[in-house]
Amino acid sequence: MTSNYNAPFGIYIHWPFCASKCPYCDFNSHVREKINHDVWRQAFRAEIERYAAETGHRRVTSIFFGGGTPSLMEPETLADIIENIKNYWPVAQNVEVTMEANPSSAEAKNFETCRSAGVNRLSLGVQSLSDDSLKFLGRRHSALEAIDALETAAQIFKLFSIDLMYGLPGQTLEGWDNELNNALNLCENHISVYQLTIEPGTVFYREKVPEVNEGLSNQLYRRTQEILNLAGLPAYEISNHARPGYECAHNLLYWRGEDYLGLGPGAHGRLTKKSGGGFFETEAIQEFRNPDKWLDSIRTDGEGTQKRYTLAFQERLEELILFGLRVSEGVDVERFYRLTGRRLFDHLKEEKLDMLVKGGFLIGSCSKLRLTESGLRRLNSIARALLV
Ligand code: SF4
């Protein structure tokens, strides 16, 4: 494994259960009447021990509880996982420990306990501050509950963020303006903004709910940038806006191509190690997606991993470019070299690069490759052009 003790290293924990399934959701989330929390606690403990035996020399810089709804975990499980991570790995003094939470009053009551367990950053799935939209999205909280939860979060956490969605049926530019400005009054340092997309396998897909048309989508996107830029929260990633210094360290680690472990059903990981000729290669690790299968596999085979393989250099290049161009800072040439042992510009189509730079979509320098604002809206086609 790479010996860079100071390189960022994250641990993602996936809690796969929710109180109900939202009609737009295609995440690995399940609704269960009964959950044996002791069994889940033991399973996470076993996975922590297993992974620590391999990576215990790395220093953990971020921990992220995602889901599902990890705020529905028993607080003992949350505390147990954090404590075990701290027992098995050296942990950075300023480690970021994020937990996703829904802004219901029941969950807000646990925020203090979560902080005592070691969580120091909350990511709240508010989605909307309009009761009509929340009802449409099948959310279990009201706008008022979300506001209360945000006020509670502000008293307990220095760092917290909200998720909001645009492109909902009937939404107007003016309505979105108001909603975004209200959100800024409640959460002034970090806002993640997503357009509602209709994903196969969801209730909205089966019901043929239409996506917002391209014209309005572009207007809503532009308005979002204007309002959040003006408020001092520029986009540091396509969907994520933060006051400088308040970016999510864990998510940045993914986009920058650093190493992380994924524990829990369906979680993914990346581990980089030296290969021949001064190069580095990265392994992709994928846990069983089905929660029962994941538990069974740990019980019978001692591990929840379904697949583990070394990425071919072309696959690694694609993910480093695709993820790296999502962030406003772009792909860092030195980091690319540290992670792969290769020079970035040796592997891109030179004539396409020139064309995209001249067209005003890309900015390339000796230290960075990044998208311009108009390039950001065309990320996938630009990445394809550079790589194919
Ligand atoms: S709460 Fe989140 S993870 Fe759970 S069903 Fe709704 S959108 Fe999906």
Image (cartoon, rainbow, N blue to C red):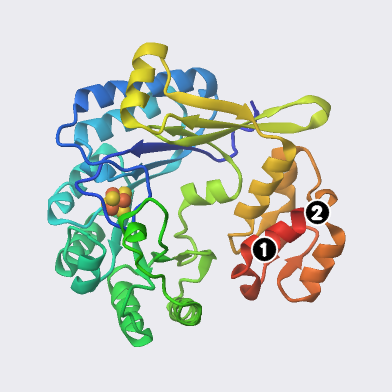
Q: Amino acid at mark 2?
A: Leu
Q: On the image, which quarter does residue 124 sit in?
A: bottom left
Does residue 360 appear left or right of residue 303 in this picture? right
What distance separates the C-alpha of mark 1 from that of mark 2? 14 Å
Q: Which mark is residue 362?
A: none
Residue 195, x across and y down, in percent? 42, 67
Q: Is residue 164 above or below residue 98?
A: below
Q: Tell us which disc is closer to us: 1 or 2.
A: 1
Residue 329 appears in the figure: no
Residue 388, x across and y down, in percent? 77, 53
Q: Compare marks 1 and 2 and give the one earlier in the sequence.
A: 2
Q: Amino acid at mark 1?
A: Ser
**SS assignment at label 1:** helix
Residue 387, x across and y down, in percent? 75, 53
Point 38% across, 50% down: residue: 201
- Which residue position holds label 1? 381
Contact, mark 1 vs mark 2 (Cβ under 8 Å): no
Q: Nearer the viewer, residue 294 or 43?
A: 294
Point 38% across, 36% down: residue: 13
Q: Residue furthest bottom?
A: 174
- Which residue position holds label 2? 348
Q: Label 2 CB, ligand 1: below 8 Å?
A: no
**SS assignment at label 2:** loop
- Within-10-Å neighbours for mark 2: few <14, some 14–19, many 20+: some
